Image (cartoon, rainbow, N blue to C red):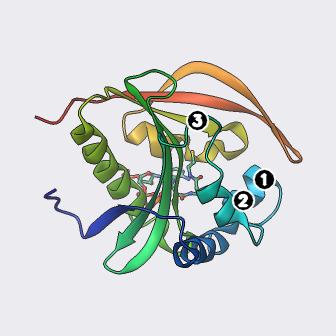
Amino acid sequence: MKNSYPLKIVELKTTDEQIEEIQKLFQQTPQYFIKTKGHPPQGNEARKMLEEKPLGFSELAKSLGIYHQQELIGYIDLIKSFPHPNSVTIGLLMISELNQGKGWGKKSYQLLEQIISGWGNFNTIRIGILEVNSQVVPFWEKLNFQDTGKRLDFNENEISTKIMIFEKKIDLAK
Ligand SMILES: CC(C)(COP(=O)(O)OP(=O)(O)OC[C@H]1O[C@@H](n2cnc3c(N)ncnc32)[C@H](O)[C@@H]1OP(=O)(O)O)[C@@H](O)C(=O)NCCC(=O)NCCS
């Protein structure tokens, strides 16, 4: 696919090498884990994320790496056809802390949207934002996501919060 950004989004494999690369990225992004899990990333965090797909979604759950030139700067996971056949739910879009605030999150999302649009059968992208991480709401709003008003309970480890469901309608690639 032609894209104007020096960015690549690549599907990750569950090889030891890639798990180690993602683990390093997570370790460079501790604040997200502290906020949403109550502690910095654990030693097996990347292995858990890459290997433990949500039940029943093994074929539909994808882990993707964001590369700027050769460097891994971010991570995305998503589930295709969830919660509706025409939706893609982004589980996480993360840029390493050193690379945040430089426009990479926005460019990565834009590239991801082009990719999803090219898959052909998805018209909605959904994201769940934890209320404990609500400072990222302006990021998603600037990308034209809208608050659906739906809230789900989130109780994991010592974190008890709500998931705010935001959505964006997208066009299929022409
Ligand atoms: C959220 C995240 C992906 C944003 O990526 P980023 O590279 O830092 O964001 P960008 O530099 O591309 O910012 C794009 C726009 O969003 C705005 N924005 C980004 N983070 C923001 C924040 N915390 N508060 C307010 N605005 C924010 C920027 O000001 C920028 O606005 P502009 O287009 O008007 O200049 C990144 O901070 C991150 O990885 N956080 C940890 C993981 C996380 O919380 N992911 C979201 C889970 S729902």
- Mark carried by residue 15: none
Q: Characterize the local packing of mark 3: few (<14), some (14-19) or many (20 or more) Cα atoms within 10 angstroms.
A: some
Residue type, mark 1 in image: Lys
Q: Characterize the local packing of mark 1: few (<14), some (14-19) or many (20 or more) Cα atoms within 10 angstroms.
A: some
Q: Which residue is drawn at 25% across and 45% down?
A: 114
Q: Along the line of sight, which residue is nearer the eye, 113 or 10?
A: 10
Q: Residue at x 32, y 29 (%)?
A: 122
- Residue farthest toward the left in the current orientation of the protein: 174
Q: In this view, does 14 lie to the left or right of 146?
A: right
Question: Compared with residue 115, is residue 16 higher up or lower down, i.e. above or below?
Answer: below
Give the residue pinned by disc 3.
128
Q: Quadrant of the C terminus?
A: top left
Q: Is mark 3 on a helix, strand or loop?
A: strand
**Which x, y percent locates residue 83?**
52, 24
Question: Compared with residue 97, is residue 69 higher up or lower down, i.e. above or below?
Answer: below
Question: Compared with residue 129, is residue 26 higher up or lower down, i.e. above or below?
Answer: below
Give the residue pinned by disc 1.
37
Q: Along the line of sight, which residue is nearer the eye, 113 or 133?
A: 113
Quarter of the image holding residue 41?
bottom right
Give the residue pinned by disc 2.
33
**Which x, y percent locates residue 141?**
44, 37
Q: What element carries label 1?
A: helix
Quarter of the image holding residue 125?
top left
**Which x, y percent locates residue 137?**
54, 40
Alpha-carbon span between mark 1 and mark 2 = 5 Å
User: For disc 3, does the CB lie below 8 Å from ligand 1?
Assistant: yes
- Residue farthest toward the right in the current orientation of the protein: 158
Q: What element carries label 2?
A: helix
